[in-house]
Every structure is written in structure tokens, then in C-alpha cells.
Image: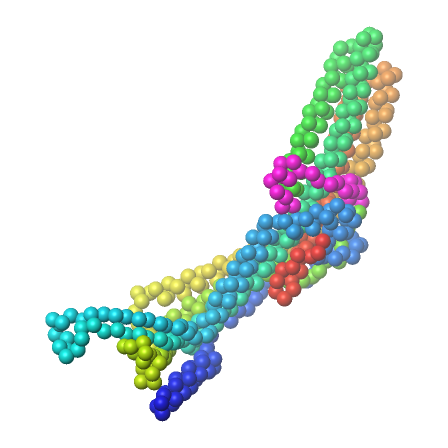
Amino acid sequence: MAERTPIRCSITITLVAVCALAACASTSLGPAYQRPALALPDNLPATGGSARVDWAVWWKGFQDPVLDALMAEAARNSQDLALASARIAEARATLAQNQANFYPTVDLNASAARQRASENAASFNAETRPYSTTQQLGLSASYEIDFWGKYARADDAARARLLSQTANQGTVLTTLYANVAQSYFALRALDAQTTLAEQTLATRQENLRLQLRRFDGGVIGELDLRQAESEAAGVEATLQATRQNRGNAESALALLLGRQPAGIMQPVLTRGLEVGALYASQSIPADLPSDVLSRRPDVLSAEQSLVAANADIGQARAAYFPKLSLTAGLGQQSKDLSSLFDPASLFWNLMANLTQPVFRAGAIGAVVAAANAREQQALAQYTQTVQNAFRDVHDALNNVAAGREIAATTSRRIEALRNTLRLSDLRYKNGYSSYLEVLNAQRDLAQAESALIDTQRSQLNAVVSLYRALGGGWEAQGGVAQAATP
């Protein structure tokens, strides 16, 4: 018993010293990360808007409660969002797994063995029995000292990939909200197109009825009658196609909302403001945030991927240097179970193993080269993501400005075409022109009114694209993408 306590104390002191040495001796290899230098614009162009908006819930600026409810439903049910959350959980587990490398592994070992030795073997002692039994119970520990920062750089890479996945969730959020809004606007535009086609068809059918009475009375010839029939049939075909497109838009929006298959087969969607009212209430921000790179989740994700690739280089380079591993064992061993816990059954061992790679046929260099190549790929992807981000902002601003001008011009054209139709109808009734002139005027007016609806929808989509281009719809809280409360 006198020797047992000093032995155990020496083992404990050794393990503590190893842990302290590991904490102080780690030296990280590989290049230190620096954000790539890119020529960024000093200021973003003016929007021409006047609204103050909450970028996290930008859709509330349209003042449509139905749209707000659709956003909340999509955030609750989106499978894309569920997939992004699962990937975050996987990245977090990977980080925890890598952090376990900073600690020694300790295992409890229990074994029992019975064996028979050959009595004809040269090593057999005739004075002993050929049968023997051994029981063993003990602890074993092993630890690799992270002198060169291999595990530290692996931890940096895993942490960066976790942040990248959380930013990817932000990309899913911004994309989801933008897609829901644009699909809703498309549906309301198709509703307006359907109403316009129904009204136009009713007018054409009434014209056809009047022309038929005139033909029966001998006032007009068959040409005018057939022209009226053709125009009515053309409008009816347009109405049928519009209804078809509206049905497809309903199922597309139901899918974005994450509804069950039955709800997609027979979508029931509440309508809110008409497309004209949505256009009138569009909320264009007065000022654009200048920190585009810190707002766009895809840019943040691409940069964290670059950080991870940079850390991988240091992890790969650590394989060039010696690896020091320590193992220790402590336990009880006896041939009889009754004496297993006797002080004389104590055993222990300590071992240090130093491994220096000498010849690997270029394998380590290949791993380092691959890590450098992946870092260059991540750099190119980051640069391309930044370029695309500013292009998105530029195009969205351009489309918003152009959309307002086109809508104003189309409105003036509609007013002129209404006067043209009125005058054409007077000329026809007084015998100064053919019925074809009236039909052309009616057709031009219907096309212009349809174009105005499409222009309003395009303008609404451009405003949504502007919010999406600037990272609207998500918030980074503690490095984690949070869905804004609709």
C-alpha cells in the first residue's frame, strides 16, 4: 500500500502536465485570413423613394394583411427552411465533434479470458497447469498534443462552416419571402387579367349580338358580322388561357406556402388587395443601407466558406511535422476474481509516441495542394458572389425606376385609346368608317389595359427584388439567421 499512492499520484501529475503542455504549446500553421480587397462603390444610387422601411419585414410596407399571413405560413411550413435548419444542426454537431479533439479520450476496459496452453510446447512448464484464467479491469487514456495547431485549425474551419450554414439559412429566408411575394403579385395580376378578359368578352358578345341584329336587318354586310364573331372568339380564348395560368399560379403559391399535397391539388387562397392597390401602396425605401456585404446572407456564407478553406490549409500543413501521442493505462489484473481488487493486482503503464513523417510519396504535399486549390475556388466564389450582389442591386434599382416611367406612359396611352375608341365608334355609326376601325380601337385598348396590369406586376416584382438584393427578410443574431416575425 505504501507504493500504491505515489504511483497513482505520479500518473495524475503526468496527465495534468500533459494537458497543461498541450494548452500552452499549440502553434497554428497556415496563412492568417484576410478579407479580399475589392473595389466597392462608395455610395449606392438614390432610389427616388420616400418610405422608411423595416428591412426585416419589408413586405408590411404593402399594407396587405393577406400578404402578411402568407409570409407567416411560408416561414412555418417551408421545407427549404427545414432543410437549412437541419444542415445547421449537422454543422453544429461537426463543430462539437472537432472540439472533442482538444481533450484526452478515456475508456473503461473490462475483460475475462480463459485459455489452455499446449503441453507439448517448448515454453510449457510441466509443474504448472495447462489451464489459466485472467480477469482485468482498468482505465486507458490517450491524447495527442496539438503542437502545430492541427485541431485548432480544424476547429476554425468547422466554426466557419457553421456560420456559413446559418447564413445559408438567411439566403433561404430572403429567397422564400421574395418568391412568396412575387407569386402573390402574379396571382393578383392574373386575377385582374381574368376580370379584364371577362369584361372584354362581355363587351364583344354584346357587340356580336348587335351586329347580328343589324345583319338580320340588312344594315351591315356579312364581313362585319364575321369580324365581330372572330373578335369575340379571340377574347374567349384569351380568357381561357388566363384562367389556366391563374390555376398554375395558385398551385405554385400553395407549394411555396408548404401546404400538404391535398392543399396543392385544390388550393384555396385568400385574396387581399387588388394589383392596382398594391401598386399604389408600394413602399420604395428612401435610403439604401451601405453595408451590402454584411447584409447579404449569401455574401456572408461565401466569406465563411473562404475562412474555412483558409483554415484547412493550416490543418493540411500540420501533417509535415511530428505528431506526439501519449497513452496511459491504470487498473487491476488477477487470475482469480476474488483477488482482482487486491493491491498487488494493480498495474499501470505510460507511453509516449513521436511520429515524424519521412516518406509519403508526395501524399502530404498533394493534400496541401488540394487545400490551396479549394481556397482559390472559395476565393473565386466569394468574389463572384460580391459581384452578383452589386449587380442585383443595380438591376433592381434600374427596374424600379424604369417601371414607374413605363406605368405612367401606359396610363397616358390608355386614356388616349379610350378617346380613340369613342371617336371610332361615332365614325362607324355615322358611316364614315368600317367596323374594322372600331375593332382595332377596342383591341388596342384591351391590350393596353392588359399591359398596364403586367407593368404594375413587374414594378412590384422589381421592388421585391430590391429588398432581396439588399438582404431584406432576415436578421443575424449571434451568428444565427433568424426568421423575422411576419
Q: Residue at x 37, y 66 (%)?
A: 365
Residue 40 visible in rendering: no
Left of 334 or right of it: where is 268?
A: right
Left of 393 or right of it: where is 323?
A: left
Position in image of residue 377 (x %, y %): 49, 58
Q: Residue at x 39, y 89 (%)?
A: 5
Give the quadrant of the N terminus. bottom left
Left of 329 or right of it: where is 405?
A: right
- Where residue 347 sits, quadrant-wise, is bottom left
Residue 271 included in the magenta stretch of the image = yes
Residue toward you, 431 or 205: 205
Position in image of residue 2 (x %, y %): 36, 92
Q: Residue at x 85, y 15 (%)?
A: 431
Q: How many marks?
A: 0
Compared with 284, 153 (above or below) is: below
Compared with 184, 90 (above or below) is: below
Residue 133 included in the magenta stretch of the image = no
What segment is highlighted magenta in the picture?
A: 256-280
- Where residue 297 sits, quadrant-wise, is bottom right
Position in image of residue 425 (x %, y %): 84, 21
Position in image of residue 466 (x %, y %): 69, 51
Residue 121 visible in rendering: yes
Q: Residue at x 73, y 44 (%)?
A: 459
Q: How is the image coloured?
A: rainbow
Left of 375 or right of it: where is 38?
A: right
The residue at the far front in this view is 338
Compared with 224, 7 (above or below) is: below
Residue toward you, 23 or 111: 111
